[in-house]
Amino acid sequence: MSQHRKPPPPKKKEEAFHNNPFKSAIKGIQEQEKKEKEAQARAAEEARKQKAPPPAAPARKSKAAHESPEDEASLFFSAMDGVAQITHRGEPPKSNPRLPELVDENAEALAELSELVAGGPGEFDIAEVGEHIEGLGPGVDRNLLRSLRRGDFSIQGQLDLHGMTQLEARAALERFLSDSRRARRRCVLVVHGRGLHSKQQLPVLKELLKAWLAQKRINAAVLAFCTARPQDGGTGALYLLLRR
């Protein structure tokens, strides 16, 4: 009896191929895409915040309507009230070594026109605030006084009354104004001091100047006057705008 061969054992199924070489690469690509999307989202959020309009600024108040010259003069005197003089205890300012400045052409034209239309010598329209004083001849354009205040006219002559008696000061002023008009000067400076060295510390010469400017002999030479700017003596001096 022939022997039967045993059938060969069944072959084992090949184990499934688990080593996928693309799996890690795909996972890396997916993670990279995720990071890029997150970065894009953050960038979009930042851009949105930057484009947001800033909070509206409060609306500025519109400028007040143009004040009249009288109101401007009042405002000027109010602003200058209490301003300290830069010279020492009423001493006259040192002479300015700078070259003569050109007179503002518009201011000079206004002065010439005022001379034509203004009346003759008469009582000045005087305003005072604190130590500041200004006066305008009859019929003279008030804008001329504003130009004088802000220094549109260069100083073409200077008289210092310090140390003079009343009679000496009066004679010196008349002579100075007469010489200035002959020289066709337009604006001059008269230093009267603040009276800080006087017995009662009162500006005696300043008060006398106000009285003299009301008198015909001196009044006839002057169109307007006002307290000087600090660099020219402040409340211890006056600008005089002369007729020619």
Image: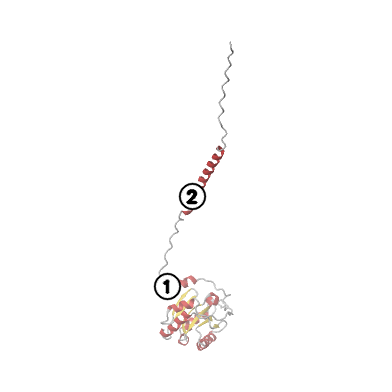
Label number found at residue 44: 2
Horizontal and vertical percent position of residue 125: 43, 79
User: Can residue 200 be seen?
Assistant: no
Amino acid type of the residue tagged 2 in the rendering: Ala
The number of discs equals 2
Q: How is the image coloured?
A: secondary structure
- Which residue position holds label 1? 71
Q: Quadrant of residue 27?
A: top right
Disc 1 to disc 2, C-alpha distance: 58 Å
Q: Residue lying farthest top?
A: 1
Is there a contact, CB below 8 Å, between mark 1 and mark 2? no
Horizontal and vertical percent position of residue 37: 50, 45
Element at label 2: helix
35 up-or-down from 91: above or below: above
Q: In which quarter of the image is residue 220?
A: bottom left
Q: Is residue 90 left or right of residue 212?
A: right
* Pick the front one: 95 or 198: 95
User: Can residue 44 be seen?
Assistant: yes
- Which circle's residue, 1 or 2, is located before the other in the chain? 2
Horizontal and vertical percent position of residue 8: 58, 20
Element at label 1: helix
* Pick the front one: 216 or 79: 79
Q: Is residue 58 left or right of residue 235?
A: left
Horizontal and vertical percent position of residue 219: 46, 85
Q: Residue at x 44, y 77 (%)?
A: 143
Q: Residue lying farthest front?
A: 1
Front label number (1 vs 2) = 2
127 up-or-down from 4: above or below: below
Amino acid type of the residue tagged 1 in the rendering: Asp
For label 2, count other residues whose C-alpha is less than 10 Å away and answer few (under 14), some (14-19) or many (20+).
Answer: few
* Pick the front one: 57 or 84: 57
